[in-house]
Image (cartoon, grey):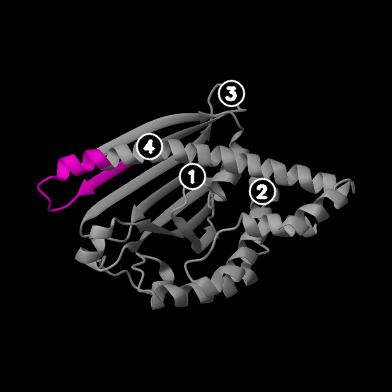
Amino acid sequence: MKIWASEHIFNHPWETVTKAAMQKYPNPMNPSVFGVDVLDRSVDTNGRLHSTRLLSTEWGLPAIAKSIIGVTRTCTYVQEHSVVDPKEKTFELKSTNISFTNLVSVDEKLTYKPHPQDPEKTVLTQEALISVKGVSLSSYLEGLMAKTISANAGKGREAMEWVIRRLNTEIEELAATARGTMRVPMAAAVADK
Amino acid sequence: LFYLYYLFIYFSMNSVGEACTDLKREYDQCFNRWFAEKFLKGDRNGDPCTETFRKYQRCVQKAIKDKDIPIDGVEFMGPNKDKPES
């Protein structure tokens, strides 16, 4: 069993980060995530939004995998439960793999909260619990997975910055279109596509 | 606004059920707007997205069953079942 944890500060207020985290996919840093579906969503009696989502990811495996398991692309699924508390300003996400549960268990928890000293900043705490089952090299494999999670966490934070920039651009372009100044260059951009 | 339509499509995610992607995007658009403009601002006046969510859900539930995806403990699947071997 391996535990990994990290903390990161975003220079954006909690609402901005939460909106971006809700729309994290697609982004160029996580190209293997090909599907996100909401399975259930509700607001509880305390005004908190609960969401259950299914993330579908596809991994390209090395050619040798084809001779062993018969496929070179494999879909893995992750189930995520999240809670947004708009009064307390917390966004907590918990996810676990639902594929290959007989081989490995990866549980992740992410929490976004306003920075206690600076309300224009947001703190993300991230933890992962990894368990590889029934393999004698388990602690080595767990170490490898922890390194991958750590590298991916960096990508995840880049992804968040990318989504925040994208959302801000969309808002600016909406405003510009409303002012009627972008009609001509946009027609040209569409023609290009 | 025509341009924004292309921007929206380019930056959208797919559904696990390919046939559900359009329904998913329609729901996501409704939800993201409600989430940002109402929910996060403390407006508790009901959810305008229940109808689009219902349509999207019917499609996704079917895709999950067809693809045999081992969803755990989600109400619409009925009583909890053990995690199957994958």
Give the amino acid type for the residue marked by disc 3 in the picture. Answer: Asp
Q: Give a yes or no on whether discs 3 and 4 share a subunit.
A: yes
> How far is mark 3 from mark 2, CA to CA?
22 Å
State the mark number for residue B36.
Answer: 2
> How far is mark 1 from mark 3, CA to CA?
28 Å
Q: Residues within 10 Å of mark 4 (few under 14, many from 20)?
A: few
Chain under callout 2 = B
Element type where label 4 sits in the image: helix
Can residue A137 be found in the magenta stretch? yes
Q: Residues within 10 Å of mark 3 (few under 14, many from 20)?
A: few
**Residue A10 percent coordinates (x, y):** 54, 31
Element type where label 3 sits in the image: loop
The residue wearing badge 4 is A151
> How far is mark 2 from mark 1, CA to CA?
24 Å
State the mark number for residue A118.
Answer: 3
Q: Please identify the residue farthest to the left as the structure is shown.
A: A136
Give the amino acid type for the residue marked by disc 4 in the picture. Answer: Ala
Dot placed on the residue nearer the N-terminal end, 4 or 1: 1
